[in-house]
Every structure is written in C-alpha cells, then in structure tokens.
Image: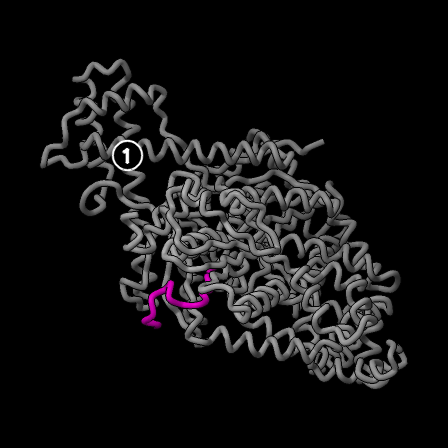
Amino acid sequence: MRVNEGLAALSQRRLLIVTGKGGTGKTTIAAALGLLSARQGIDTVVIELGETPLLPRLLSDDPATLQTDGGRDPIQLAPHLFTLRIVPEVALIEYLELQLRVRRIVNAVVRNKGFRRMLDAAPGWRALITLGKLWYLQSRMQGERPRWPLLIVDGPATGHGISFLSVPKVVLDSVQLGPLRRHTDWVQDLLQDPQRTLVLPVTLAEELPVSETLELCARMAGLGMTIGPVIANAVEPGPELPQLETVLSTLARLTPPARDAPLLDPELLRTCVEYRVRRSSLQRGFLKQLERGCGSSIVSLPYLVRAIENPASLAPLAKHLKRALAGWEMPA
Amino acid sequence: MSETPWLEHQILVIVGTGGVGKTTVSAALGLEAARRGKRVLVLTIDPARRLGDALGIELGHEPHSIPGAVLRAAGIEASGEFVAMMLDTKQTFDDLVRRYSPDEEALERILTNPIYQNLTDALAGSREYSAMESLHQLHSAGEYDLIVLDTPPSSHALEFLDAPRRLTGFLQSDLLKLLFRPALALGRTGFRLFRFGSATVLRALEMVTGLGFLRAISDFLLAFESMLEGFTERARATEALLRDPICGFVLVVGPDPEQARRAEDFWKRLQQERVHLLGLVMNRVRTWPGRGRTPELGTAEAKQLTEQLTKELAKRDPGFEPEQAARELVATLTQQALLARRDAEVGARLEEAIGLSPEAVRKIPLFSEDVHALEGLRRMASHLFEEARDV
C-alpha cells in the first residue's frame, strides 16, 4: 500500500482537536479521521464532548455501544477504534478520587449542595476538567507504550472552542502554586506541543465560516497552539465544461422543449449550469481568502449528497479525506 | 402560536443552532421592518464583522445607524431607520459591574481580578446573560419600534433563557453565603473564614486546587456578591420580558437532516418555556428552477436525456465534444433535482413533526451570490415576506 504521508504525519500526533462553526461537519470529519488512523493499526479514541452521543452511531452498527456511553473508559467499536464521550461531572469525580483517594470525602464533596450549585455556574471548570481528562488519557501507559496513542476530539463549536482552549492559560495566570497549578501546567504543555497536539479547523467555503476560521487561527496562534490542516468541507465542484461559453451559446440556439421531453429545456439547463458555475467561483474565492489568511494548507472535501449517519455512509467521506490529506505537510 | 404578524412585535428573538444563517436572517428581518417605516435595531453577538462591512459600517458595541443613502444605493427605500449593533460581552459586563458596584473599592476589586478579566466569556452563560441584559436595557430605553436579537451561536440551545437564572442561582447559593458573607462584613477575604463552611468539603477542595485558585475565585465571587441584588432584580425582569407577548421567537434552520432533528428538539423546548413562537425560517434551501414538480431522475432517465441532448447539440455543429458536454449538463441537472428533492423532504418532515401551519414557515433559497451585501439581504427579505416581493 502506498504511504499517505499527510495522514501518517497527522496520526503521529497524540491529540487532534477538530473544531469549527456548528453545521460544518466537524463530527463526521473527526469520525472519518478516526476510521483512517484505526485502519493503520493505531489505537484511536474518537472523543466527543456534547450532551448526546453522536459518534457510536457513526462508527458502529451495533446499538449496544450506546449503552456504555458517558463512562470513564473508551469503548471499543471496531479493531483499533474506540470512542468516549467525556462528561465533565464524571471526569470531575474521577479526578477527585485520584486526588483525595478517600471515597467518603469525595462523596461528601460532590453531594454538598453548595458545591454543586457552585459548579453550575463556576467559570471554565468544565473545559478544564475535560482537558485534564484528555491529558490523563494520553499519559496512560501499557508497558513501554502509550495505551492511547491517538486521541481525536470532536471539539466545541468555534466560539466556545476558543474560550475552551484558553482556560488553562487563565488558570496559570491566576494560580501560582499547588496541585491545580501543576496539573494545568501539564495540560498546557500538551496543548502547546506541536509534536503532540494540533488543532484542525473545519469550515465551509462560505463567508461567515471562513471569517470565523481566520479568527480562530489567529487566536490559536496567540495561545501558542499549532494549526494542522484546515479542512474545507462540502466544496461544490464546478461543472467540467472547458468551453463553457461555447456550450452556453450553443444551448441558446436549441429549440424550446417538446411537450414529451420537458427536461430537454435549454433554459433550464442554462440556469442550472450558471448556478453551479457561480456557486463554485464564489466558493473558490472564499477558499483563496482562507488560504491567504490562515498560513496553513487547505484540505478540500467535496460536497456529498448522501446524509452521513452510519458507518456505511461515513466510508465515502473517509475515502475523500484520505485522498485530500495525502498532500498535506506539517508546517516547518 | 402567536397571531400577530412577525414585524408587529417589539422584540424578535432569532434562535437556532450554529451555522444556519441567524445573523443574516436577523439583518434581513430588520431591513424589511425599516423599509416599512419602523425604527429598527439589529443586535448581534456573533463577531460577524463581514456583516458590518456589507452594511458599510464598522460594527461595534455602540448602535450604528445605516445612512439612507447607503440603503438607497442598494435599491432600498426605507422610510424607517436601520440601526445595527454588535454586542461585546466584556463591555456589557463592565457596564453592569459599574452600575451595581456598591463602592469604588468593590468596583476596582472586580475589574482587576484575573478570573474576571479573562473568563467573562467562559463564565457559564455570560454571553447569553449579557445579550439578555442589553436587550432589556435597550427595550426599556424605548428608542426603537423593533429590536431583532440575533442570539449567540450555541449548541446548548436554550442557554440564553437559563442564563439569568443560573447566574443568580449561583450567586445566591448557600455555600457562597456561608463562605463569603462574614468576609464581607470584615471588609476583606479572610481564609480563616473557611471554617464556617463544611470543614471536610473545604479542606478537600483546597487540597485539590491549592490556595491561590480558591483565593482568586473567592475574590471574584465576593465582588460579585456585592452586586447580587441588582443582578437578581434585572434577571427577573428580563425573564418576564422574554415571555411577554410583545416578544416573538423565530427559529432558523438549515435543510440538513441533522440540523432539522436538533431544530425539532429546540422547538419543543421553547414550547415548554412558554415563549411566543412565531414560526420557522428554513434557510439555504436548494430549489428546482424548472416549472412544475422536481423530477425524479434515475440512471436510465439521465442516460436517455444525455443521448437526446448529445443529438441536439451535435446538430448545431458546436465546436466542442457534444457527448461529454451533454453528460456534464445532465449531471448538473440531476444534481440540482436531487438536492431540491432532499431539501424539500427534510423541510416537510420537520413541518409535520412540529405541526406548523404553512404561513408559519418561510423558505429562503440558497443564493449563489454573496448574501451579506445589502442587495442580498433585500432579496432574502423578499422571500420572508410576500409583500416585499414586488419591491
């Protein structure tokens, strides 16, 4: 098999954070990426942070996988392929148990009414504990090797993504000493190490998603994090008509449609083609703007008509992603 | 569902999951109201700078009126006024803190607190809270006939409704009172005061977080605590405003099955919240440009059509390979039909699921031009309102 260097370079990281505006296809891309790295024999955990589990259905046909959702440990879905939905409350208890060791005290803390109300509104703790859990997972060893060599996170939508990833810095700015400081240092080291962590923005070739992605890239650089490939999803290819003008003018000379063949309508054909040409050139413009602004290479994926909701419909996306990643190079 | 026409409300709250075009729909609604002679404010939270560019202004925390000349240049004769504003969470909070601080010292303490400075955005529901706060303030000022609120993009769909409750619930928690009220009385944060709480819990927390963090948090909370009364009162008023019949909610959704599914949940939860739901805007719908129903084009039909078209093109001595061109043209047609059918199905399923009357659903086609320009917003409005069509 031919070595796909782009994919190999990505799979050598420890943590890939897929982020982007809602509706850009973040989740399916995280899932497809997980599929590709698992196929290379790398134990991959695709992680989600939302309130409802989306990944098990995308990555497995077995409905039983949903029943173990939201626990502490990754669930296996296929050879080398695992998933986990990190629930901050669950991760917090796990963390408290690791720190306090005495279950009775942990119980007293988490049952405390005031503590629970504080959690309900306290700034940033969900992000912090989630990032801490990611650090913990990547630090687990099995003999000489990492137990989870690759974590792929279906991250929060951009706006939330930026504040999500800036929480460690805020903690470090305000806490000088103690275990929290030490643990947050570890998390920050992981996030800022380009050999281990990359952020993968997913966007559409549309105006607002592109401007948000540019903002995201700038903010990530400000946090000392490295952007991996920027994935432009659902790009509509233009019609392959090299002599477009001649084709259109020939169409104009055709006779209007016969009653029995209403689709052989020159006007209808022209409308459809022109629409596609305009859409595609509009999108190309946005992609250029993105390429200029974000300083990382763009990986384009074509628009797929079929809705992606299970492994069978995910497979074509994975195929396109693999092909598109082949040319990607880790920036120097 | 409310019987009042959409633009006859004093407030329109535009909700929906991220990436469906809430901001542009909000702007288009505002533009149409201005065309009808209303003084309109479109309040956006999304850092949609490009929207400001399209409107020809630097959109910022201050309300900004779009000059009539700019609107006229885009073919819009507005007898009202169109004002846009981009909300800044941090500034809204700073304003709030200034308003409710009991004294200079408390003000200084909170504005310089590192947690406050860096985490206003991450504080649970703070974006949503500041949106609600600004809405309330701008509405009571009574300067506008209509305020269109473009809500924050959020996967936690209803966070903006919960925000006032969560924030004040937190500030009123027993733990806080227990921990910080005595400190307030002493005029400074004394860590000795932790013994007033449950000793085990506090010692455990301290062990996990270290002293510095608890101190920063407690300073932050202490400062906020002093403003509690103002916050609570305001939050209550805002909640009441959102349920008032003068305030209508419009849900924006894209024609994607997953988005439609989430929109359905969202709608049901809004119903439980007993706000006034006006209807649904389905944005970026792919339509069939031909007459009549969207055809079903299978492989056999496409093949036949390609053959016929090849023949027709060849007759014209076109100077290009007719078969290849015909194949590509028919593929384009097939693609369009497929997308139009899919979008129509998604729409129909959603309408049925939430039981909407046809007039409560407005569809906007996917434009192939840049829709953020004023001209695009005007076209969008013409799809939202029948009456705007002949403008």
Chain ID at mark 1: A
A65, above or below B364, in the image: below
> Depth check: B175 or B261 in front?
B175
How many numbered discs sit on the rendered protein? 1
Q: Quick check: B181 left or right of B135? A: right
Q: Report the residue at 34% width, 61% height from top.
A: B350
Answer whether residue A59 is visible to the viewer in this image.
Answer: no
> Depth check: B319 or A135 in front?
B319
Please provide percent x and percent y for residue A86: 62, 62
Q: Secondary structure at mark 1?
A: helix
Q: Report the residue at 28% width, 34% height from top.
A: A271
Please provide percent x and percent y for residue B335: 31, 39
Q: Report the residue at 32% width, 49% height from top.
A: B342
Amino acid identity at mark 1: Thr
Answer whether residue B125 is visible to the viewer in this image.
Answer: yes
B222, above or below A328, in the image: below
Q: Quick check: B239 left or right of B384? A: right
Quarter of the image for residue A291 reads top right
Is A165 in the magenta? no
Work out which quarter of the rendered image holds the C terminus of chain A and state it.
top right
> Depth check: B286 or B208 in front?
B286
Please provide percent x and percent y for residue B30: 43, 56
A291, above or below A251, in the image: below
Q: Quick check: B16 left or right of A184? A: left
**Which residue position holds label 1?**
A271
Neighbour tally class for label 1: few under 14, some 14-19, many 20 plus, Cα within 10 Å: some
Work out which quarter of the rendered image holds the N terminus of chain A and state it.
top right
Magenta residues, start to end? B1-16
Q: Report the residue at 37% width, 31% height from top.
A: A277
Is B12 in the magenta? yes
